[in-house]
Image (spheres, rainbow, N blue to C red):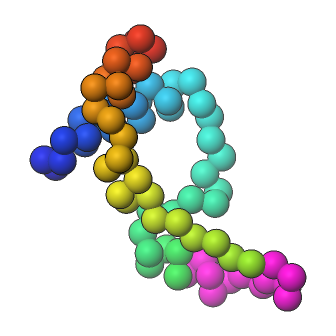
């Protein structure tokens, strides 16, 4: 990847994974696995399903501030 925030994001992921344990049962990595899981769902009428694509989440994060915060944490 050549995106400016790619390396910062990879570093942040490593740092966060050391300190935060997330139960990933509600996360999917590919749209095909999401579609397969949706077939198995049995939602009630008062429930809603929400999806969010995090692919472009980091484009608005200020790089200098992110690097400074990352350096403070390591």
* Residue 67 found in image quarter: top left
Estimate the x, y position of residue 42 in percent, counting from the top left.
78, 84
Quarter-wise, where is residue 44 in the image?
A: bottom right
Quadrant holding the C terminus:
top left
Closer to the camera in the image, 8 or 43: 8
Q: Is residue 69 above or below residue 48?
A: above
Q: Residue most toward the left? A: 2
Residue at point 81%, 78% (across, down): 47
Q: Horizontal placement of 38 versus 32: left or right?
A: right
Q: Nearer the viewer, residue 48 or 41?
A: 48
Where is residue 55? Give x, y as percent: 37, 59
Tag count: 0
- Residue 23 in magenta stretch: no
What segment carries the magenta color?
36-47
Task: Report the residue at 85% width, 88% height from top.
Answer: 45
- Residue at 45% in and 14% down: 73
Please say whether residue 39 is one of the residues in the magenta stretch: yes
Q: Nearer the viewer, residue 42 or 71?
A: 71
- Residue at x 74%, y 78% (from the top left corner): 48
Q: Where does the image place residue 4, in percent across and percent down from the top left?
A: 19, 41
Residue 15 to residue 55: above or below: above
Residue in front for this viewpoint, 69 or 31? 69
Residue 72 lies in quadrant: top left
């Amino acid at each position: 990847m050549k995106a400016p925030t790619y390396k910062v994001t990879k570093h942040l992921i490593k740092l966060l994974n050391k300190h935060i344990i997330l139960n990933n049962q509600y996360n999917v990595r590919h749209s095909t696995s999401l579609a397969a899981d949706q077939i198995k769902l049995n939602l009630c009428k008062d429930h809603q399903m929400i999806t969010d694509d995090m692919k472009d989440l980091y484009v608005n994060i200020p790089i200098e501030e992110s690097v400074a915060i990352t350096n403070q944490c390591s």
